[in-house]
Image (tube, helix red, strand yellow):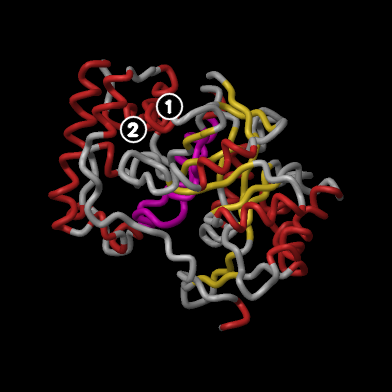
């Protein structure tokens, strides 16, 4: 698989693997750690070198799973994990950007992952109760100390990106980006291009919907997509037009709608790395094969003309309270 560059010197595979759904969020009752570990190791064999997780996934279980799965893979794989969200006993989440907390979180992630250093440490959410420069400065100290190799941030505004970049170099920004979620193309992604910062695109398959294999009726009651307005019954019916459009393009390429959706993300430019998640070997291999697709100008034009998704999900910056508010 070909490689791309995040930031100035963080080289990774063109496609990464999002590990969240292996132990968190999507049909958690179907969790199978053994199969998930096989998926991780097969990804390494296929040339995937970037694996994305977070301490809050599980919580903690996802990092532990990834640490075990990669223990026999040597230095082939880079781990990107996140900090700054806290799971509470009642299942809710809160933000915590305090330096002392982040330092403890880093130590915990290193222990669970079984690593001497975290390759890419990402702030999961900005905590408005703590000065951002203070939070980011503490993360920069972890790099200086050798516990972290590079820093990333998730769900930050352009203003916040400017502020962190002034404190310590930013390597990657993570946001949702897909054919049915394009809100960040002209703002956050444009900022990344202008500043030489990488972009990790999570949910490039529209949380599975763009594959054409998922709809609201098949989701378990505990599946987090039940809260996504794009999976509401009325929206699912309307949004089928997007999948139908991808399927027509896929037929011309002898591909699948999923592969076209991933190829579209890859076509957004160098430094844009899709990190689709899966728990199945079949879908992993299908996703990796998408890196060999090259969309034509006509393909891209047709995708641009697809209808906007009904129920477009805009991530609410105040979705999680700060730790000081709880």
| Residue segment shown in magenta | 16-42
> What secondary structure is found at the residue carrying circle 2?
helix
First in sequence, mark 1 or 2: give its number. 2
Q: CA distance from mark 1 to mark 2?
A: 10 Å
Say left or right for 19 vs 159: left
Residue, x 30% and y 54% (percent of image)?
312
Residue 168 rendering spot, x and y as whole percentages: 76, 50
Q: Is residue 141 magenta?
A: no
Classify mark 1: helix, strand or loop.
loop
Query: Is residue 31 in the magenta section?
Result: yes
Q: Residues within 10 Å of mark 1 (few under 14, many from 20)?
A: some
Q: Which residue is mark 1?
A: 267
Note whether residue 42 is visible. no
Which x, y percent locates residue 281?
40, 31
Tag 2 residue: 261
Question: Is residue 160 at least partly visible in the picture?
Answer: yes
Relative vertical location of residue 278 with respect to residue 95 in this rendering, above or below: above
């Amino acid at each position: 698989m070909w490689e791309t560059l995040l930031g100035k010197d963080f080289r990774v595979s063109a496609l990464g693997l999002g590990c969240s759904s292996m132990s968190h969020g999507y049909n958690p009752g179907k969790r199978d750690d053994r199969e998930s570990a096989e998926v991780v190791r097969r990804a390494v064999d296929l040339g995937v070198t970037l694996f994305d997780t977070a301490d809050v996934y599980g919580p903690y279980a996802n990092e532990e799973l990834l640490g075990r799965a990669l223990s026999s893979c040597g230095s082939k794989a880079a781990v990107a994990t996140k900090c700054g969200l806290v799971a509470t006993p009642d299942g809710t989440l809160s933000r915590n950007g305090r330096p002392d907390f982040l330092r403890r979180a880093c130590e915990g992630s290193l222990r669970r992952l079984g690593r001497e250093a975290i390759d890419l440490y990402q702030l999961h959410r900005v905590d408005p109760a703590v000065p951002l420069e203070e939070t980011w400065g503490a993360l920069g100290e972890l790099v200086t100390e050798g516990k972290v190799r590079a820093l990333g941030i998730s769900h930050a505004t352009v203003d916040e990106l400017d502020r962190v970049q002034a404190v310590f170099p930013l390597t990657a920004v993570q946001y949702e980006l897909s054919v049915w979620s394009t809100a960040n193309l002209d703002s956050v992604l444009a900022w990344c291009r202008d500043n030489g910062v990488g972009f990790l695109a999570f949910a490039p398959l529209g949380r599975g919907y763009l594959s054409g294999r998922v709809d609201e009726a098949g989701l378990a009651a505990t599946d987090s997509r039940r809260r996504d307005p794009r999976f509401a019954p009325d929206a699912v019916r309307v949004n089928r037009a997007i999948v139908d459009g991808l399927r027509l393009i896929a037929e011309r390429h002898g591909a699948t709608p999923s592969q076209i959706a991933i190829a579209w993300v890859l076509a957004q430019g160098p430094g844009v790395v899709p990190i689709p998640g899966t728990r199945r070997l079949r879908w992993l291999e299908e996703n990796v094969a998408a890196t060999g697709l090259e969309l034509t100008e006509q393909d891209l034009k047709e995708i641009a003309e697809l209808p906007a998704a009904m129920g477009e999900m805009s991530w609410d910056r105040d979705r999680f309270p700060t730790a000081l508010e709880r």
